[in-house]
Image (tube, rainbow, N blue to C red):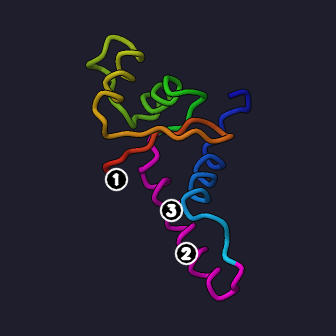
Amino acid sequence: MRAPVHEARALAYLARQDTGPPPADAEERADWRAELRAALNGYRAGRAIAVGVDRLDAVRRAVGAGRYDARDHQDLAEALDAVEHGCMSSWRTTPYGVVWIDNES
């Protein structure tokens, strides 16, 4: 990815992907907006652990923000391996960065 990382835009992009396009019916749009807000708030509340240029950068940013403790690992590559081995996370790519998602939230 060549674009700079932009966490807010990445999370908004994911929320929009989760809720799909807005409905044509004006009455249904209010419900769609509520779903969109709920999805975005879920990512902001901790479902999204970090956003980075790539997976390794997302782990680095999570460690820097205090969202992930990597002290038991020799380096960030080993920490990334542990995260991926745990199968409790997923990764989603957006135009604004790679997002580390907590599947347990």
The residue located at (26%, 19%) in the rendering is 72
The residue located at (30%, 20%) in the rendering is 71
In the picture provided, is 46 more to the left or to the right than 92? left
Which kind of residue does numbered mark 3 sit on?
A: Ala
Q: Quadrant of the N terminus?
A: top right
Judged from the image, the secondary structure of the residue bearing numbered disc 2 is: helix
The residue located at (73%, 27%) in the rendering is 2
Instruction: Residue 25: give x, y in percent of width and height.
Output: 69, 85
Which kind of residue does numbered mark 2 sit on?
A: Ala
Instruction: Residue 17: give x, y in percent of width and height.
Output: 59, 56
Q: CA distance from mark 3 to mark 1?
A: 12 Å
Crowdedness near tag 2: few (<14), some (14–19) or many (≥20) residues, C-alpha within 10 Å: few
Residue annotated with mark 1: 105
Instruction: Residue 54: give x, y in percent of width and height.
Output: 56, 27
- Provide the residue span drawn in magenta: 24-49
Residue annotated with mark 2: 34
Residue extending furthest toward the bottom:
27
Mark 3 / mark 2, whichever is N-terminal: 2
Please say whether residue 35 is one of the residues in the magenta stretch.
yes
Which kind of residue does numbered mark 1 sit on?
A: Ser
In the picture provided, is 84 more to the left or to the right than 32? left
Residue nearer the viewer, 35 or 59? 35
Residue annotated with mark 3: 39
Crowdedness near tag 1: few (<14), some (14–19) or many (≥20) residues, C-alpha within 10 Å: few
Residue extending furthest toward the top:
74
